[in-house]
Amino acid sequence: MLKVPTPVRRTALLLFLGVSLCYMSMAPGTVGGRGYVNEELDSGSRMLEIFNTWIKGRPVPPMLWARHGPIPILFDLPFIKLGKLLISPDFGMSLEPVLVTALLVTLLFLWLRKLCSPGMSLLLSLTAAFGTMFWPYAYLGMETKQSLFVMLAGYLGLAVGKIRGWPRVLLFAVVCGLALTMKATGIVMWPAFAYLIYVQFRDDWRSRLPQLLVTAGIVAGFLAVGWWSQHFYWDASGGGVNNIRPWMIKSPFQLFTNTIGMFGSPSKGLLIYAPVLIVSLFSLARAFRAHRDVVVFASTVITCTVGFLSLLTYGSDEVWGPRYMHLAIAPLTLCIGAAWPRFHWLRHAPVVLLSIIGVVISFLGAFYYYGILDFAMKESGQNTMEWINGDPVWNDIMFNARLFALWMEGGDAPVVWTPAHLWVWEPPAGAAPWGTVNLRPYSNPQAALLNLWKGPIDGPSLTLFRLFFVSLLAGPLLLIWTVLRTFKEGRNRALSKLWERTAMG
């Protein structure tokens, strides 16, 4: 059931390695200052410490809890342990989102290969890898595990046919449970996973009733354990409900404006940070006719997520783009392939154009640490959530483009910038002048390779430099190899079909 043709597996492996190494070449080599990832690093390190002291019979230290509970941290432990053996736990943790994102791209490619041609599959996969928020978030670290398990659950539920046999049923149930518990907010997506279970059992649920009940029970068990374990963090902070209450909307009219803003906001809209998804809006009806279950699953995941986010005054924060919509990228990209299985230059020129625009935007997000915008806003006295979410002066893309141009110019001289705004039509009496910011310190890229290149290096820094430099050379070569294999396979398929038609004629 889970078997994939050998040529496709080899191409997928090349794609995974190529994307991983390309991501690695610009990696920061750290998770410092990256949201709740630091909490998970501390919690995972404490887990390993507790296990070690318990094995040795020493006093066990108290547990450090993270906001999303211990379930997602279990996947961090191998990277933390590997980091300890190589350089540091911080470095090991920084590898995880890189590999998880590359695995997500590979999974998208494998699913697309079941829906469309080799060339179209690779085009959409590479666009997702480098022309959407996937690239910046491979360094940011948040959201990646949830997006992977959501996609994996959909793949197992929809792409490989009926799941027969208890081992595979249990695997499917566990993956669904993990997808819903990788983050505390995952529970809002339960209708999408109920639909996956429905698809698997709708034709023969009576004869498979024990498997159906066990699957539903395992998913419910994961939700219960996740909810229970998250209380250890939130109860110490006054409770999860009390923490989210100040962020809730005050008027029902905000439901409409927030929903539109999640997709089309110039500052935080998903279609701005993943432009190729504009095409998906035109593909849904066609994809629904060809692959109904795929579209229903994707639409349900996105509807549930947007429905929850629209209840918040702001569905995004200071992080690059609409981070909570990260999980929507792969399903919507899948819908494009389901609608148009073959690539035609004239018809799909917008896909290519939007992919190029997306690469430029995503490069700016990957080149800089997302926190520099917040630091600059604080320095100028303008760090409000309203300005973060709606002020074009502080648009993430524009700000990073300004920094990149400054970095390309070189030099060390201070560059003073005034984030000024337009008064309507004159400033109020006594208005303070707009603060200024020296952009020079913020223009340094986050890539460890570029930072290490500037000075003498030795010890662990030399190891990092060699790793990232080899990645810079090998990653693009592997992707070129992947493209050549895909072209060859597409040509062979075309010749085979032509031969069949000729023989039949």
Image (cartoon, rainbow, N blue to C red):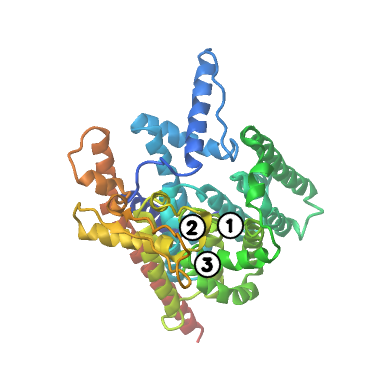
Q: Which of marks 2 and 3 is nearer the N terminus?
A: 3
> Looking at the image, is 44 positioned above or below residue 108?
above
Q: On the rendered structure, is 420 left or right of 232?
A: left
Q: What element carries label 1?
A: loop
Note whether residue 50 is visible: yes
Q: Camera-side residue: 499 or 402?
A: 402
Q: Where is residue 256 in the image (x, y as percent from the top left)?
A: 65, 67
Q: Which residue lies furthest to the right in this view?
A: 206
Crowding at dot 2, Cα within 10 Å, few <14 / some 14-19 / many 20+, comes out as: many
Q: Earlier in the sequence, mark 1 or mark 2?
A: 1
> Which residue is drawn at the image coordinates 24% and 32% (left, top)?
459
Q: Camera-side residue: 43 or 262?
A: 262
Q: Where is residue 404 in the image (x, y as percent from the top left)?
A: 30, 59
Q: Residue beneath label 1, please?
A: 314
Q: Earlier in the sequence, mark 1 or mark 3?
A: 3
Q: On the rendered structure, is 360 left or right of 219?
A: left
Tag on residue 388?
Answer: 2
- What's the CA distance linking mark 2 and mark 3? 12 Å
The three-letter code of the residue at mark 2 reads Ile
Q: Residue beneath label 3, please?
A: 265
Q: On the rendered structure, is 13 left or right of 68?
A: left
Badge 1 vs badge 3, beta-carbon distance below 8 Å: no
The three-letter code of the residue at mark 3 reads Ser
